[in-house]
Amino acid sequence: MTDGLLARLPAALRSRRDVLSDRERWAAARVVASDDHAAVLVRDVGDGPAVWAVGDPGSLGTLLPPALVAHAAGARWVTAPRDVPVPPKALAAAGVVRRTAWDRLTSAAPPRPVEGEGAVRALDPDRDTAAIAACLDAANPATQARPGADDDAAWWGVEGEHDDLLGVIGVAWRGGVAGDRSVHLHGLGVVPAARGRGLGTALTAVATRRALEGGAPWASLGMYADNAAARHVYLSLGFAVDVENAGYGPPGADRP
C-alpha cells in the first residue's frame, strides 16, 4: 500500500512532493537504508533493481554506497541527488555509470497568461493517438510519454494547417495529499519547423493552469540540467527546482 510506504520512510520525507508524487510507483519498494533525514529505496523493474536515494545529501553520502554494494547488483537505474558523492567501487558493484543530470521542478500556482495560448486545444488520447505519436516522433523522439498509458490525465496540442500537430504536451496523474492527485507534465515537443514561436511555453502554461485550477495540488516536470532554454520557460511560468538529481545506469543502456 502506498500509505504503507510513507509509514516506512523517515518523517522528514513524508511531506516531500517527489515522495508523495511517486509513492504509488514505489509502493512495493524495500527501504534498504535510512536515517532521520534520508532513505534508499530499491524496487524490481523486471530485469533488475531500480534505486532511489532521497533526502539529505549528507546522509545519503553515508547510506547510498553500502546500499549499492549490498542491494543493487545489476541495477537498471539509480537516482540520487547530484551532490551525493558515489565512490567508483559502489558504482562498479551496481554495474552503473553516471548517465544524466536532471532537475525536478514543481509549481502550485497557475501560471501567468502567455502569448499563443489561444492555439492550444485539448486532444482526445484515442482519436488523436496517431497524430500525437507522429508529432512526438518528430519533436521529442526520446520521450517515453505516449497516449494511452494507465496514468493519462490529458493531452494538449497545437494544430498545423494540414490536420497535423505542431506541438504537444501530456499530463499524467501522480500521488498527492488528502485524496487529491497531483499531475506530472511530460512529452512536451514542438516540431522543428515550428520552434521559436513560443508554442512550448503556451502548451506548458495551458496544461499547468488547467490542472491546478482543476484541483491538482501541484504540477511537476523533469528537465535535463543543461537545457537552459527549457529552464527559462519553466521558471518564467512559476516552476521552481525541488531536487537536482543525477541518474546512473548500465553503460550504453537507455533509461528504462
Image: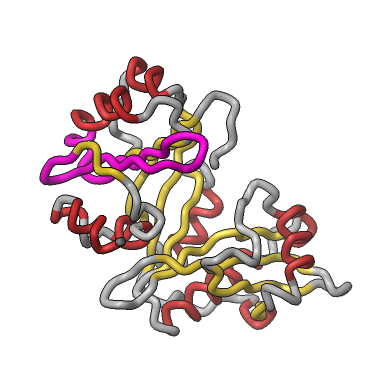
Q: Tell which of 113 and 157 is nearer to you.
A: 157
Residue 68 lies, in percent from the top left, at 32, 27
Please check the rendered image and state whether residue 57 is part of the magenta-colored stretch, yes or no: yes
Residue 225 lies, in percent from the top left, at 47, 43
Residue at 63% from the left image edge and 73% from the top image edge: 156
Please check the rendered image and state whether residue 210 is part of the magenta-colored stretch, yes or no: no
Residue 251 lies, in percent from the top left, at 54, 24
Residue at 46% from the left image edge and 34% from the top image edge: 48
Q: Tell which of 83 and 32 is nearer to you.
A: 32
Quadrant including the C terminus: top right
The image shows residue 213, relative to residue 201, as above or below, that is below
Asked whether residue 17 is in view, the answer is yes
Q: Is residue 84 left or right of residue 172?
A: left
The image shows residue 150, relative to residue 98, as above or below, that is below
Residue at 29% from the left image edge and 43% from the top image edge: 30
Location of residue 117 by image quarter: bottom right
Q: Is residue 148 left or right of residue 231?
A: right
Q: Is residue 185 left or right of residue 110?
A: right
Q: Which residues are magenta?
A: 34-60
